[in-house]
Structures are given as C-alpha cells and as structure tokens.
Image (spheres, rainbow, N blue to C red):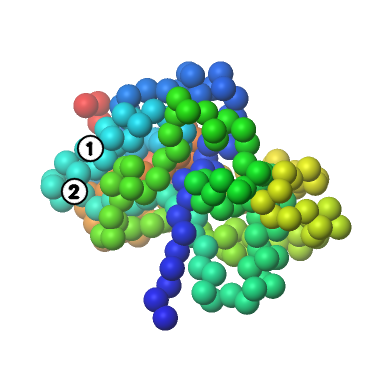
C-alpha cells in the first residue's frame, strides 16, 4: 500500500518566538537566502531561512526563487516532519499523538483543522499565512530531510526515558484546549532543534548532488548550522 505522509511546517516557529511582536519584526515580502561554496567538493549550498508564519508574498518569493534554482540544476532539500499512520495500529497512533502533544504543548495536526482547539491563538491572525508545501512550490522531485513523529519520540525516550502520559493527558481529547503539564523546554529543543540540525548536516555532507537548495526554519540556521557549514564542513560564505 502506498504510504501517505502528512507534512507540517510549524515547528521552528515555536523555537524562535510565539509573540505578536516577533511576528511583526520578521514579517517581510522576500526571503534573504545565504549562499555557501565548498571549493574542495565543488558544492554550492543555497540556504532558505524560513519563517513559518509570514505574509503570502514571502512564500511566493520563496516559490519563485526555488523554481529558478531548479532550472539551474539545484536539488531542493526541505523540512517537514512526517507521520505515516498506515503502518501503525490505532492505539499506537493515539499514544504517539498524545506524547507529541506533551512535547509541543498542542496537538500536531494539519493547521487548517478548525476543530483543533489546542493550537495557539496567533494561528488565527489574518494578517499572516502559515507556510505549506503548496505555497512555496515543493514538488514530488524535492527531497524531505527530516524525522518522523515516531523517530522524534524514540529519540527523546532513548535519551530521557519513556514519556509518561498522565490522567490529564489521557483524558483530555486530542483537539481540546491542552492544559496538562508539558515536558521541559530543554529536552524539546534537543529533539526538535539540535537533533534535526545534525540530520541536516549529515544529509548535506553525504549528498551526491553538487547544488543544493536547503529550505528549513530560520532558527536552525542561526542556531549552529551557518557556523557549522563555515567551520568543519568547509564551506565559504558567498556575498551575492
């Protein structure tokens, strides 16, 4: 049976800031890409630091720039946590969803789900649009470089022990307002931010492609990736 994956672009938003002030500061009509070149490997990397809640013009600019880069021979690597429910039993799906909610503080569903009352209120801010695959032009030839929900939970539990769901977690319907205790922020950063940064670095390092456009949340780049590319990965920043 063909696998069905649901992709979401919400997570980096929660690790930069959730305030309306921040949204005002980052709001823009164009993405500021950064280009790096590794002379030894003859590899070029164009980074797209994404803000997942922004004006529609921002995503249109991303779409156009990705289209142009594809025409120049670039391969697109993009962010998107996946969830393959067809391979899981219903109890397993329910458990993973509740553990992910305990990690994030909201039920991890498609942002268009109007029945999900656990989403933060600023998701309804009409001045901004949430990033989607369609809005930035991601297609079937692009390559997803990310973890699945089950991998994120496994990473957490491997390092910090099994996530224990309380009565509050079990009794609160998934889409209801979530008022149970969440997991410590430092652990959330570890599996959502730092572990995914490592995955990105390895994907770029092992990539057979000479030209890569990397589309990922802004916080991932500013939090170690830019420094790593220019450090041990051997890339030099190109001023364009």
Give the numbered dot on residue 65: 1
Label located before the other in sequence (1 or 2): 1
In depth, the one of 24 and 154 nearer the eye is 24
Residue 42 visible in image: no
Which quarter of the image is occupied by the C terminus? top left
Which quadrant of the view contains residue 161? Answer: bottom right
When the figure is inspected, residue 90 is found, relative to residue 113, above or below; the finding is below
Residue found 63% across the figure and 68% down from its top: 93
Q: Position of residue 7 (x, y in %)?
A: 45, 55
**SS label for mark 2:** helix
Name the image quarter holding residue 203.
bottom left
Residue at left offset 25%, top offset 26%: 239
Q: Position of residue 214 (x, y in %)?
A: 34, 45
Name the quadrant of the N terminus. Answer: bottom left
Which one is nearer the viewer's eye here, 124 or 221?
124
How many C-alpha atoms fall within 10 Å of the one at disc 1: few (<14), some, or many (≥20)?
some
- x then y, percent, for residue 12: 52, 40
Give the Cα separation between the discs numbered 1 and 2. Answer: 9 Å
Q: What is the secondary structure assignment of the residue under circle 1? A: helix
Residue for badge 2: 70
Lateral position of residue 95 relative to residue 35, left or right: right
Q: Is residue 132 left or right of residue 70?
A: right
Where is residue 178 drawn, in percent x and y? 74, 45
Image point (52%, 28%), residue name: 125
Question: Would residue 58 be seen by someone viewing this image from the given angle?
Answer: yes
Q: Residues within 10 Å of mark 2 (few under 14, many from 20)?
A: some
Relative to 23, is 77 above or below?
Answer: below
Which residue sits at x=62%, y=41%? 119
Residue 56 position (above or below residue 107):
above
Residue farthest to the left?
71
Q: Tell me: residue 27, above or below residue 6.
A: above
């Amino acid at each position: 049976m063909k696998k069905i994956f649901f992709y979401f672009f919400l997570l980096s938003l929660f690790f930069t800031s959730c305030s309306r002030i921040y949204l005002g500061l980052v709001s823009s009509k164009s993405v500021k890409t950064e280009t790096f070149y590794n002379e030894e490997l003859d590899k070029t990397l164009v980074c797209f630091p994404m803000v997942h809640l922004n004006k529609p013009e921002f995503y249109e600019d991303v779409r156009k720039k990705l289209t142009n880069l594809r025409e120049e021979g670039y391969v697109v690597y993009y962010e998107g946590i996946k969830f393959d429910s067809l391979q899981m039993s219903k109890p397993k799906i329910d458990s993973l969803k509740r553990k992910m909610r305990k990690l994030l503080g909201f039920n991890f569903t498609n942002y268009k789900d109007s029945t999900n009352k656990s989403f933060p209120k600023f998701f309804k801010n009409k001045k901004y649009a949430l990033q989607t695959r369609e809005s930035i032009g991601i297609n079937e030839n692009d390559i997803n470089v990310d973890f699945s929900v089950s991998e994120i939970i496994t990473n957490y539990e491997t390092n910090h022990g099994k996530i224990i769901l309380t009565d509050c977690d079990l009794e609160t319907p998934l889409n209801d307002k979530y008022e149970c205790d969440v997991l410590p922020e430092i652990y959330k950063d570890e599996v959502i931010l730092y572990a995914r940064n490592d995955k990105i670095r390895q994907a770029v390092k092992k990539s057979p492609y000479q030209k890569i456009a990397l589309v990922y949340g802004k916080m991932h780049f500013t939090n170690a990736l830019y420094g790593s590319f220019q450090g041990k990965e051997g890339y030099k920043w190109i001023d364009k």
